[in-house]
Amino acid sequence: MLLFLLCYLAIYGAAHAYLVWRTVHGFQLDAPCPAILIGVAVFMILAPILVRILERFAMDGPARLVAYLCYLWMGFFFLLLSASLALDLVRGLLALTGWLVQRNLVLPETWLLTLSIGIALAASLYGYFEASHLKVERLTLHTPKLPKSAGRVRIALVSDVHLGVMIGKQKLERVLKTVAAERVDLLLSAGDLVDGERDGLKERDQELNAVNPRLGKFAVLGNHEVIAGLAHSVAFTQESGFRLLRGEAVAVGAHLTVAGVDDPMLQGAEGGAAERVLLATLPLERFTILLKHRPAVEPESRGLFDLQLSGHVHKGQIFPFNLLTHLVYPVKMGLSDAGSGSHLYVSRGTGTWGPPIRVLAPPEVTIIDLLPAGT
């Protein structure tokens, strides 16, 4: 955790220093403007830490206020940084072209800064709108492991809900109404259900507990359950009516098995081996769903499960950060072939982490219909 905090302060702090310098230099700002900008930057860098402290002392109102300020800023800041770097590249290419053709093609710094701010503001407004509009993604799979007499099995997948100071009653209600309207048989959570202190989640467990599909509810732990506090995250998930799968598998109905493993933050170096050992004990004649927070398929696990359901990456949440997440997890969003008869489905996530903004990565609830082969 300390290493994560130091990396956050170094990277986020350096990015703020770059944009403060660009703004002061580009607009030629005099005192006291530089000092004000530095003060705002320092506050915004430290504000997410302040949110956690306020949550810890059950100061939900102030925590929510500070969170909205700093996370809206974070979303705008990421977009501003991206626009600034992109326009810097354009300016460099124009300067190089001008040098080659011996013409002055250098754009004024104030134009570039103003355009960057305009792009970031427009994208932030759009992203706030996109994040509030939940989409239903539908997936139909035919399998010989379901007899024709079994009919359809409908599954709802949620992932990365991030219940806490930013995702509360209204957004959870929207998710649960969507699930209820689909009349699902099974509800699965692929991790990061929780993102806040338990005191800030009052009544959310009761709302989740009211949803009772006929085949049950199962969940696994993600990395944010660890960050938020493992003990209270486990307790909240279980009190919400989910069967928490931690390196175990459960027979669901007559033809399905649901297996689940902890996030690598909990598994340690032997996590992959534990997964393979677990899957190797399961009957191959049943349709096996593997719940796993991060979208990484173990090579030795291929062929031992039918469908892995994962999240974690949010499709970057804010474009162009999907380019960075794809470098770490080079998988496609949605359904893909994992090899040896196994498939992987990666959700874009149901909520948001940090900024209540999504750009070209709308939130989703996934509805999966399992049908007998030939139907």
Image (spheres, rainbow, N blue to C red):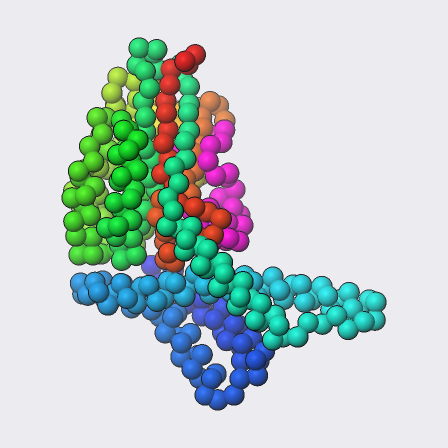
Q: Is residue 186 above or below residue 315?
A: above
Question: Could you say where residue 292 lies in the image, as x and y percent from the top left?
Answer: 36, 37
Residue at 42% from the left image edge and 29% from the top image edge: 139
The stretch of residues the image draws in magenta is 309-338
Inspect this view and state whether residue 93 appears.
Answer: yes
The quarter in which the C terminus is drawn is top left
Quarter of the image holding residue 96? bottom right
Question: Could you say where residue 203 lies in the image, as x and y percent from the top left?
Answer: 16, 49
Residue at 50% from the left image edge and 29% from the top image edge: 337
Residue at 63% from the left image edge and 66% from the top image edge: 88
Asked whether residue 322 is drawn in magenta, I would say yes
Q: Nearer the viewer, residue 297 or 181?
A: 181
Q: Is residue 169 above or below residue 85?
A: above
Quarter of the image holding residue 295? top left
Numbered-mark total: 0
Question: Could you say where residue 53 lies in the image, as x and y percent from the top left?
Answer: 25, 66
In the rendered structure, the answer to whether residue 257 lies left or right of residue 35 reads: left
Inspect this view and state whether residue 163 appears.
Answer: no
Q: Nearer the viewer, residue 113 or 237?
A: 113
Residue at 26% from the left image edge and 17% from the top image edge: 254
Q: Nearer the viewer, residue 143 or 221?
A: 143
Question: Could you say where residue 45 lies in the image, as x and y percent from the top left?
Answer: 39, 69
Asked whether residue 181 is drawn in magenta, I would say no
The quarter in which the N terminus is drawn is bottom left
Q: In the displayed orientation, state which residue is furthest to the bottom.
A: 31
